Amino acid sequence: MKVTIYDVAKKAGVSIATVSKVINNTGNMRESTRQKVKETMKQMNYQPSVMASALMGKKTETLGLLVPDISNPFFSEMARTIEDRAHERGMSVIMCSTDENAEKEMKYVELLQRKQVDGFIVASSFHDKSLLQELIKNNIPLVMLTQDDPSLDVSKVSVDDFKGGYEAISYHFSNGHRKIAIIAENAHSSILRIYGYREAHEAYGVECKEEYILRTNASIPSGKKVFEELFSRTDIDPPTAIFACNDQLAIGVIQGAKERGLEIPKDLAIIGFDNTILATTTVPGLTTVAQPIALMGKKIVDILIEEIKEGKSSKERILYNPDLIVRGTT
Amino acid sequence: MKVTIYDVAKKAGVSIATVSKVINNTGNMRESTRQKVKETMKQMNYQPSVMASALMGKKTETLGLLVPDISNPFFSEMARTIEDRAHERGMSVIMCSTDENAEKEMKYVELLQRKQVDGFIVASSFHDKSLLQELIKNNIPLVMLTQDDPSLDVSKVSVDDFKGGYEAISYHFSNGHRKIAIIAENAHSSILRIYGYREAHEAYGVECKEEYILRTNASIPSGKKVFEELFSRTDIDPPTAIFACNDQLAIGVIQGAKERGLEIPKDLAIIGFDNTILATTTVPGLTTVAQPIALMGKKIVDILIEEIKEGKSSKERILYNPDLIVRGTT
DNA sequence: TTGAAAGCGCTAACAA
DNA sequence: TTGTTAGCGCTTTCAA
């Protein structure tokens, strides 16, 4: 059977209390005793049970991560940096893909609570915000990632979406484009990027055409579909540049454009968002607004762990600068 | 505070034993009692503590998933189907990216044991196989995914790599190619795919040039690099077709080829492996050998849960058929 | 400096 | 049919 604290205590000739103290590095005792116990633990290959100590109100050293879809490169890249940082700091992470589906959201929040995760990282929008409010009320550490939702009063890490949208459009303008469409997702972040889009039009003194503001869900086929619809309209001029609110949408646009025989970037310039691996797989490479995924992942873990330790939320709101990566599509 | 079994018992006017029985659906009791308790649990929003029951030797309902890198689309897509199936069956999954790094392998196996996961899904090769042997010896359920390693006697789910290699090369042959290179990863699966490569040459009566058998690690830049090296050699003819052992390598090749001004598939035909999202992002789309990721993920979870329940390994070895998806690069 | 003992929330054998 | 009780492996107070 598994070796327990009793086995160690007996072998080391001390009480379990003493062993517990050396495990947790607490209490006072003769240095020689501490060493002897440490030795025995190593010898017996003793691993304290997380279950038992969690039962005593200690932490489980586990984080819950809620993302829309882990198979989406943006979130899997994010998950990777979160995982790494969490492990560096002695925690593991349970991941859950909500599909932005109300039922799953509820199910997973419940599940993670039952597993007594020490805290939540929420990188998915929630239909039922009260689920999260409930966690906050119960003083369960909860931070949000890429979700700068003003209705939740917690710490947040995200990219400056407004600025990202503004810069993408400004870049299109600076390249001489005047007919620029935006394809947005159904997400809070896209709302801000659309404001950035408007603001850039304002700044350049170009009128903003509502017909150029499109919305859909995030996927390659959706991007392609929206592109096709846009370019088959006869009532408006086709745009000469497109800003897609994520790389997948942008790729859908690229595919649609190539099928239609358009040359990129000559006939149509395209900017994506996120700078996932997908932006590097296309030829030409996709110009895109990069989110500092590695920084953001690390930061959110650090904030969450801090809040777990402190027992209260710092409610900081961290905005990273987006960074336009120019590749071949512009 | 959190509501415990005692609170429920008191409110329902029964003993904790009775409550425990209704939680686990065991024992006999008056139906009305069972209903009353159920009612109370719901009313109080009672969630049994996984920690406490795990302490009593029950399951933690958590699986450990070891992959080389969750941010690699192949593994993130796999992780997604595993996550879904696991949740469907009432389990959550803790993911760990080993980077095929010996130290991390050890660290994560230890970690997951401390967390008392009910079983392991290993989708990463291991430097130190004895770590896994140890788990097996201790009767900890462990199954392998995409790792058909003969030295470990456990249940395995993978694709028929030999056949996949054979079919990719045969397809190149059938398109008239005779100078075909293979770019393999440093992984067990690649060994089998190389055998498939050889076998196809045998079948078509074409001599196998060792210079056409290349190895590297799995990434887009590696693929590109190997391609460039191959095409700058003067001592051998450049191949007219390439089989890359994963989609990333294939994309590296595409990028290299385009830079070199080669037309795809006219000057160079390319086949990848895995059929991840990456195969759909290139233009032209990547012809690739598909692994049935969704099927495999679901199957491996089902096998593992079965073994957890049975308490012993069925040691089945399931081989799925690869499926050549023809797109634009051939 | 060390250890005895109570108790965390639960399960399961056994008694009533 | 229902309840009493002894742990599971650990932490922590308090006493020695």
Image (cartoon, coloured by chain):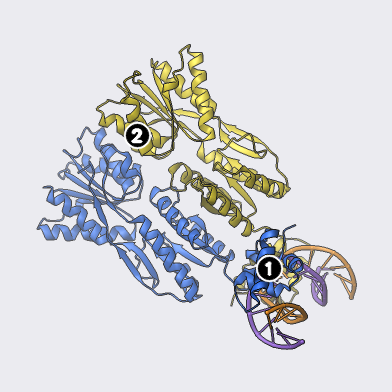
Chain colours: A yellow, B blue, C purple, D orange
Q: Where does the image place residue D6, in percent across and percent down from the top left?
A: 73, 81
How many other residues sit within 10 Å of disc 1, few (<14), some (14-19) or many (≥20)?
some
Q: Where does the image place residue A112, in percent across and percent down from the top left?
A: 60, 55
B60 displayed left or right of A7: left
Residue B92 seen: yes
B280 above or below A109?
above
Image disc number at residue A204? none
For this rendering, which residue is in front, A208 or A258? A208
Amino acid at circle 2:
Lys
Please tell me in which quadrant of the rendered image residue B38 appears. Answer: bottom right
**Residue placed at 73% from the left, 48% from the top?**
A311
**Residue placed at 23% from the left, 56% from the top?**
B165
B114 displayed left or right of B323: right
Q: Secondary structure at mark 1?
A: helix
A281 above or below B57?
above
For this rendering, which residue is in front, B92 or B158? B92
Q: CA distance from mark 1 to mark 2?
A: 54 Å
Callout 1 and callout 2 share a chain: no
The quadrant the C terminus of chain A occupies is top left
Amino acid at circle 1:
Lys
Q: Which residue in the structure is indicated by mark 2?
A: A225
Q: Which residue in the structure is indicated by mark 1?
A: B36
For this rendering, which residue is in front, A208 or B216? A208
Q: Where does the image place residue B113, in percent across and percent down from the top left?
A: 55, 66
The quadrant the N terminus of chain A occupies is bottom right
Chain holding disc 1? B
Residue A42 seen: no
How many other residues sit within 10 Å of disc 2, few (<14), some (14-19) or many (≥20)?
some
